[in-house]
Image (tube, rainbow, N blue to C red):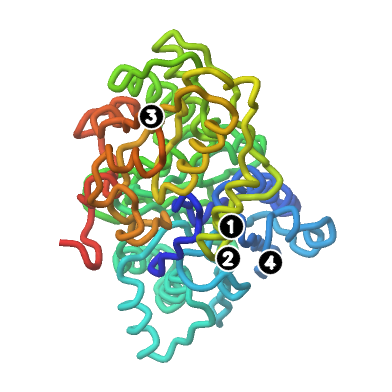
Amino acid sequence: MKFLNASDESGLREECGVIGVFLKDEEKDAVPLIYRGLLSLQHRGQESAGIAAAKNKVIELRKGMGLVSEVFGQASLENVKGSAAIGHVRYSTAGASIIDNAQPFVSRFKLGSIAVAHNGTLTNADVVRELLEDSGIGFTSSSDSEVIINLIAKNYRKGLERALTDTIQFIKGSYALVVLTDDALVAARDPNGIRPLCLGALGDRGWIVASESCAIDEAGGALLRDVEPGEVVIINGEGLHSFTFSEKTTRAVCAFEFVYFARPDSIIDKVDVYGARIRAGKILARESPAPADLVIGVPDSGVPAAIGYGQALGVPYGLGIVKNKYIGRTFISPSQALREKAVLTKHNVIASEVRGKRVVIIDDSIVRGTTSKRLVAILRGAGAKEVHMRVCSPPVCCPCYFGIDTPHRKDLISNGASVQRVCQSIGADSLAFISVEGLLESLDGGPEAGYCLGCFTGEYPIPVPGEG
């Protein structure tokens, strides 16, 4: 989303996760399944959560600020019910972290009601918003997701399928979209498939769509397939049907989903996330071995790569670093000073594990360098003889425009800086990143495999504002 709010100490965060459930039996309640699925997607958004459910041709909405378990106590769940429902967890990359920007959004009009939840970023949101405002449509939030629901509502008189087609062909950028109507659940994915979205079955009870397959697992469903780039899936009382709304485009799935954002137990576009991270570690060891007595990973996403790195070199893997899981992600810290204090609280070293040893520490990425610098320092403070940093993504040197909240270009430590200079900045004995080719290999693909690598290469799958 368009206003980048670079406040994470790592500088990277995914802004949301979506889920939708449609049950064939109108007397059954889909909301408990949405709740469980949202809990499994909590890593994708911790600022707000929301659920919209359709029952008896009426859509009810509940949403609030905070974690899923905080927003939805037992009483809140009892106040929203329906055989079809959608849910959303959010980080803010467009607009302030306030309830007005929490999702889903609901629009009620004379032809019915619709609710929308969206993961991604519209690169033409400002233009579309201005056109809608000129036609007399008002906005209650600064989220570009509200642009989508207003477009659908504006075209709804043409019928659901036509309204969806017209809307999706008008918006540009990345999106995994779930839409709830009075009697249908809709899922749509942008023509490049930048943001993930998958489809599952709930036995003979109904259907489920979600940002990641781990949410389908949590709801007791079975993963069927990914929603294809440029595909719209409509589920209603007559069953499931889909259509493609765009001409064939270049597949460009976000590579960072596999490096960092997705849960390791998810499968995205047929790629096992955990397996990809293990392979990345092995490839990193082949490309950039280091003299070591111990390999450790930065919890959580650096751990599988560290296991792979250690396996490839025949060096023991150890826990080394403990992460405090009860303070949440530190992106909410508004200043650099507070971010650095948050890093102190977030990670601690098991001194007995690293003392007197040459340690290789594996992380998923280096963006600002705040976390890396602190980790190197606390490892040395705990008695590590040497500290060698290895990173299972290429240097992040360019912003993301498609739903990952990266810092401005000037705040990216690898923007215009050599690996040696970054190494000196974080205080490590040596530093190496996996190559772009190595990353693609870890994803079971070569240069033509179809991944968005814009934050590493500056080459984006679609035109973006401010880039050539």
Q: Residue at x 47, y 19 (%)?
A: 358
The residue lying toward the viewer, choosing from 394 and 383, is 383
Which is more N-terminal, label 2 or label 4? 4
Which is more N-terminal, label 1 or label 2? 1
- Image quadrant assignment for residue 425: top left
Query: According to the image, label 4 marks what residue?
Result: 64
Query: According to the image, label 3 marks what residue?
Result: 429
| Residue sticking out furthest to the top | 314
- Disc 2 and disc 1 in contact, CB within 8 angstroms: yes
Does 434 appear above or below 35? above
Query: According to the image, label 1 marks what residue?
Result: 88
Name the residue type under label 4.
Gly
Name the residue type under label 2.
Gln
* Residue 59 image position (x, y, % from top left): 65, 68
Q: How far is disc 2 from disc 1 in space, using C-alphas?
A: 6 Å
Of badges 4 and 2, nearer the viewer stands: 4
Q: Residue at x 39, y 48 (%)?
A: 367
Name the residue type under label 3.
Asp
Residue 200 numbered tag: none
Name the residue type under label 1.
His
Query: According to the image, label 2 marks what residue?
Result: 103
